[in-house]
Structures are given as C-alpha cells and as structure tokens.
Amino acid sequence: MFANTWHYVDKQNVFFTLFLGYLAFCALEYFWETPWMQLFSLLALLGISILLHADYGWRGFIFLVLMYLLRNEKVSQAIVGSCWLSYEWKACFAFISINMYNGKRGFIRGKAAKYFFYLFYPVHITILVIIRNLFFL
C-alpha cells in the first residue's frame, strides 16, 4: 500500500516491472515456433508497462527482454546492456561483476557470514537514519 491506496497511478513497484519481464520470458518460450505471436505478446506487455507506469518505464521492460535474449552471450549482453543503460551510467559497472561470476559459490561460507549479511543491511540503514537525524534535521 502506497499513498493510502492499493494502486498508485503515477508509478509502480519494481516488482511489477520484473513480473512483466517474467511474462515476456514465458511468452518468448511458449511461442518459440511462432515469431509473430512472440512479437504480439511483447508489444502487448510493453503497452501494459507504459499504460500502468511500470518502474523504469518502457526502458526497463525492453532492457529485461534484451538481457533475456542475450542470456547465453555474456560479452554481447555486457555491450548491449551498457549501451542501453548509458542514461544510467553507474549501472554499467554491474556488468563487470556479472561477467566475472563463474556460477560457483564464493569464498564466504558458514552461518556467521550468512547472518552478517542478513544483519548488515538493516543495521547500516539504521545508522544512516540516525546520522541524518543528528546532522541534517
């Protein structure tokens, strides 16, 4: 619930954009033999993302589809993704770590590390709120 309403007309949650992307992935797989149905499905979902003000707008939906279509080509994915995200240039650095990932679990193991990362985010947000209230109120 946002702004005391169930549907905030001006902007949607990022999960709505991700859900539309998921539906696009399903449509691409389901209609693999009929490209015109793939195109129709993608255009319909793109229209929904524009009409309902999906987070990141139409760019976010198209970005998800591009990354899905290039999912097996890391270099092409990084190049196309970086070009597409040029308006959000800091996001381009994400492709460095994405391309370095080899599919194996990292060096951080065990329950202590797991709970450290579970606690880190809420604790550091709380500290930032305290600092803001102390110095910038």
Image (spheres, helix red, strand yellow):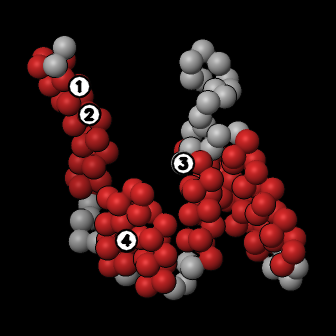
Question: Label 4 is placed on what type of residue?
Answer: Phe
Viewer-closest of 116 and 98 = 98
Q: Position of residue 82 (x, y in %)?
A: 42, 70
Question: Label 2 is placed on what type of residue?
Answer: Ile
Q: Residue at x 45, y 71 (%)?
A: 83
**Circle nearer the N terminus (2, 3):** 3
Regarding residue 104, the answer to whether it shows in the image is no
Q: On the image, numbered disc 3 is attached to which residue?
A: 56
Question: Label 1 is placed on what type of residue?
Answer: Val
Q: Position of residue 15 (x, y in %)?
A: 58, 45
Q: On the image, numbered disc 4 is attached to which residue?
A: 95
Q: Which residue is drawn at 23% across and 48% down?
A: 116
- Secondary structure under the numbered disc 3 in the rendered image: loop
Q: On the image, numbered disc 2 is attached to which residue?
A: 125
Task: Check contact, mark 2 vs mark 1: CB within 8 A.
Answer: yes
Query: How many C-alpha atoms fall within 10 Å of the one at disc 2: few (<14), some, or many (≥20)?
Result: few
Task: Check contact, mark 1 vs mark 3: CB within 8 A.
Answer: no
Q: Position of residue 131 (x, y in %)?
A: 14, 25
Q: Distance between the residues labelled 4 and 1?
A: 30 Å
- Secondary structure under the numbered disc 1 in the rendered image: helix
Viewer-closest of 54 and 2 = 54
Residue extending farthest to the left is: 135
